[in-house]
């Protein structure tokens, strides 16, 4: 996959059969020396992050490793089945594709959504000299919400050539070259006029022992439900250790008077009286408490900050992260400040 001063160009021809036969092709370039790749004009992978600008919407996320590989670039070459797939890969011995012998990697897995399910078996054929894939065969079984089952087969063939890195545009692996631009994460925060939204700043770090680093992912979004007075704004933070870190912290915010209505309408918002730890703040106080899990939902720490004219409910999306600890929640509520 690597040659000094060169980039690996990969072309894939695909044939799908379900209700007929469909063919397509794709290509991508892998610059292993700089840990980056590009797929056509749709995606750029840099240091394990996937950047895209599909239909003008910029997105950045971690690349999901598949086939038990150790690299996002190797995973891309081996062609992950689905973003949400759960799978296992094993060595399948020797096999042939169209008369050509190779070592076979077998990946079996499932993809489940709320109303449909897939199962698949993928056989990847590796060249015994280069260990690069030259073909793959895959069978899918799709079961929809109506119970109808559809089978599909997918055959891919690979071809390779190295190109001089200097022959590509200088910005070829720059996410901006496909139209990706970082989104304005504060745009909606600026629209809130009838309450004071609180945030942690564009970036937030907490020292040891928490070692918490966050970055603003999205601004406030106003939501009002007549008669219920649901949260009026959200401020979400992602893991700040990477530019494409996963969403981690969700803060729901209310004006104080709306909170008084919401707490009587929505069960489970507040901890039981006497539960949790009181944390004194400059313009109010907060309660940090452990919300007990039930069923498949694990226990996790949360917090409610009662500030001058705003109540902020803080929760984490990853119960295993240091943010979802008593120390993590204390650091977060102590870092809250008015946006304006």
Image: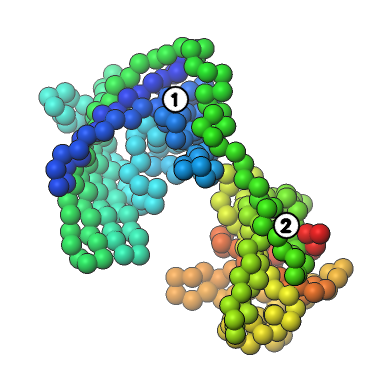
Q: Residues within 10 Å of mark 1 (few under 14, many from 20)?
A: many
Q: Is residue 133 visible?
A: no
Q: Position of residue 240 (x, y in %)?
A: 65, 47
Residue tagged by mark 2? Answer: 190
Which residue is found at the position 35% from the left and 60% from the top?
113
Left of 58 or right of it: where is 260? right
For the residue labelled by badge 2, is the local secondary structure a helix, a strand or a loop? helix
Q: Position of residue 191 (x, y in %)?
A: 70, 60
Which residue is found at the position 58% from the left and 47% from the top?
245
Residue tagged by mark 1? Answer: 30
Q: Position of residue 282 (x, y in %)?
A: 87, 68
Give the answer, above or below, for where 280 lies relative to 32.
below
Q: Nearer the viewer, residue 106 or 11?
A: 11
Q: Position of residue 192 (x, y in %)?
A: 72, 64
Tell whether label 1 touches label 2 (CB within 8 Å): no
For the residue labelled by badge 1, is the local secondary structure a helix, a strand or a loop? strand
The residue most toward the right is 282
Q: Earlier in the sequence, mark 2 or mark 1?
A: 1
Give the answer, above or below, for where 138 lies relative to 172.
below
Residue 329 location, quadrant: bottom right
Left of 208 or right of it: where is 301? left
Which residue is found at the position 52% from the left and 23% from the top?
172
Q: Quadrant of the C terminus?
A: bottom right
Q: Quadrant of the N terminus?
A: top left
Left of 336 or right of it: where is 220? left
Residue 22 location, quadrant: top left
Total marks in image: 2
Marks 2 and 1, how far apart at CA: 41 Å
């Amino acid at each position: 996959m690597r040659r000094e001063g060169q980039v690996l160009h990969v072309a894939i021809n695909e044939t799908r059969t379900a209700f007929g036969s469909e063919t397509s092709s794709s290509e991508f370039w892998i610059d292993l020396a700089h840990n980056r790749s590009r797929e056509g004009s749709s995606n750029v992978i840099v240091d394990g992050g996937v950047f895209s600008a599909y239909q003008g919407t910029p997105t950045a996320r971690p690349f999901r490793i598949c086939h038990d590989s150790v690299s996002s670039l190797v995973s891309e070459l081996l062609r992950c089945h689905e973003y949400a797939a759960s799978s296992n890969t094993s060595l399948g011995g020797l096999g042939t594709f169209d008369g050509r012998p190779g070592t076979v990697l077998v990946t079996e897995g499932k993809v489940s959504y709320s109303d449909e399910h897939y199962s698949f078996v993928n056989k990847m054929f590796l060249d015994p000299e280069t260990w690069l894939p030259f073909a793959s065969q895959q069978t899918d079984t799709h079961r929809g919400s109506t119970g109808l089952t559809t089978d599909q087969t997918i055959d891919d063939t690979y071809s390779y050539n190295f190109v001089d890195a200097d022959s590509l545009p200088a910005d070829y692996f720059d996410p901006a070259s496909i139209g990706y631009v970082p989104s304005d994460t504060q745009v909606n925060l600026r629209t809130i006029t009838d309450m004071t939204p609180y945030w942690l700043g564009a970036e937030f770090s907490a020292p040891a022992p928490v070692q918490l680093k966050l970055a603003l992912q999205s601004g406030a979004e106003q939501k009002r439900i007549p008669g219920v007075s649901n949260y009026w704004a959200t401020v979400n933070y992602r893991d700040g250790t990477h530019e494409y870190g996963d969403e981690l912290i969700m803060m729901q915010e209310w004006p104080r008077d709306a909170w008084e209505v919401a707490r009587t309408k929505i069960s489970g918002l507040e901890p039981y009286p006497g539960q949790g730890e009181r944390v004194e703040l400059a313009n109010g106080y907060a309660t940090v408490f452990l919300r007990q899990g039930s069923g498949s939902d694990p226990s996790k720490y949360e917090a409610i900050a009662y500030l001058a004219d705003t109540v902020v409910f803080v929760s984490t999306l990853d119960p295993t992260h240091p943010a979802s600890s008593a120390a993590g929640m204390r650091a977060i509520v102590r870092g809250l400040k008015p946006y304006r």
